[in-house]
Amino acid sequence: MICLGIESTAHTFGISVVRDKDKKVLSNIITAFKTKSGGLVPAKVADHHIDVLEDTFVKALETAGIKAIEIDLIAFSQGPGIGNTLRIGAGFARSLSLLLNKPLIGVNHCIAHLEVGRFLTKAKDPVLLYASGANTQVIAYEAGKYRVFGETLDLGIGNFLDTFARNLGLGFPGGPKIEELAKKSKHYIKLPYVVKGMDISLGGLETNLKNRVHQGKDSKEDLCFSVQETVFAMLIEVAERAMAHTGKTELLLGGGVACNKRLQEMSRIMCEERGAKLFLLENQFFVDNAAMIAITGIEMHKAGVKTPINKSEIRPYERTDDVDVKWR
Ligand code: ATP
Ligand code: FE2
């Protein structure tokens, strides 16, 4: 089976072609909306997705070396995400499904970050530490659903890092720039560490850092190093507690922040200490991408899940545990 996946939950528009029989991602085209300064205006991001839609589609088919008529299934990200941008992907998916007369399948974006790991690695039943711009969640399968075992109570970790980087004058996206500067320091500045039960909170830390940057006493390098050590330790703590609670012995990383080598290293140390296995992916499968949507679509389709056009409405607020997982 050949599945075409479409991703459009936020600033990334992606199209991918995945072949099921040999578990091959034939193409994974990612086009990300970027700004030089300022945040994302939903209507502008939606316009970007329309601008790149045709090129992305043609490139995805060309790279995969297939023609549109060879597609057996069309998967799209149905939610959660920004309404304006979700609508672009969903509308295109419906049109393709009607034109090609092939089944349509709506996929939950957060679950797709976990399924891509199960498809591409040997992980069978991992706990997912999903750390992206807007999302920060620890997710695992339990009793018929993917459940959120811990999450941020306020800011997403990536958005938090980007705001801190902007305050330091580092530009967007901030995560990679912070990582580079952090390598130049080993001096730890004690910062607020807020873990509440299974959840984390970053709002207080954000204010603390804004004040520190304003005072100008600490070096950028020391701040970047200390921020990474603090917030990644918070993530690892809740991920570890979820593993202990569920008795699971595999950890998978996901989301753009998972590209960070220090977060990967801390994850590896934690897993080694508790005799668990860590699974990492190529960066193209950590960040928002359409391959994970196609992969999840294939799994759902094989389990008989269907999304008729009249049930293909976008679901901007869909939660991970809203989805009945019939394919596991
Ligand atoms: P979602 O819609 O799922 O929340 P997103 O739209 O934010 O995702 P992603 O590509 O998953 O998109 O993640 C982007 C985030 O990842 C940005 O906040 C960016 O700063 C962060 N990031 C990217 N590379 C690194 C890195 N090396 N270290 C830390 N953070 C990083
Ligand atoms: Fe994501």
Image (cartoon, rainbow, N blue to C red):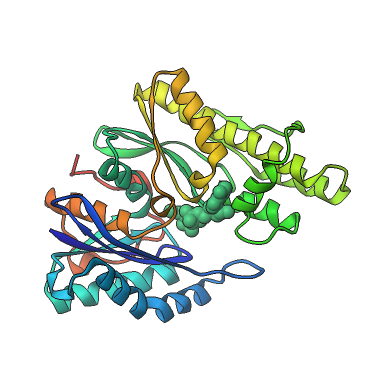
Q: Is residue 231 left or right of residue 301?
A: right
Q: Is residue 136 left or right of residue 67?
A: right
Quadrant, the N terminus: bottom left
User: Residue at image x 52%, y 77%?
Assistant: 44
Q: Position of residue 227 (x, y in %)?
A: 68, 40
In the rendered image of this protein, does residue 135 appear above or below residue 12?
A: above
Q: Is residue 223 left or right of residue 319?
A: right
Q: Is residue 131 left or right of residue 168?
A: left
Q: Position of residue 55 (x, y in %)?
A: 36, 78
User: Residue at image x 49%, y 51%?
Assistant: 256
Viewer-proximal residue among 315 and 32: 32
In the rendered image of this protein, does residue 227 appear above or below residue 168?
A: above
Viewer-proximal residue among 84 and 249: 249
Quadrant, the C terminus: top left
Viewer-proximal residue among 25 and 252: 25
Q: Position of residue 297 (x, y in %)?
A: 22, 55
Q: Position of residue 79 (x, y in %)?
A: 36, 58
User: Residue at image x 24%, y 45%?
Assistant: 324
Marks counted in the figure total 0
In the rendered image of this protein, does residue 318 appear above or below residue 245?
A: below
Residue 48 seen in the figure: yes
Residue 133 seen in the figure: no
User: Residue at image x 24%, y 66%?
Assistant: 64
Q: In the displayed image of the protein, which residue is found farthest to the top?
A: 274
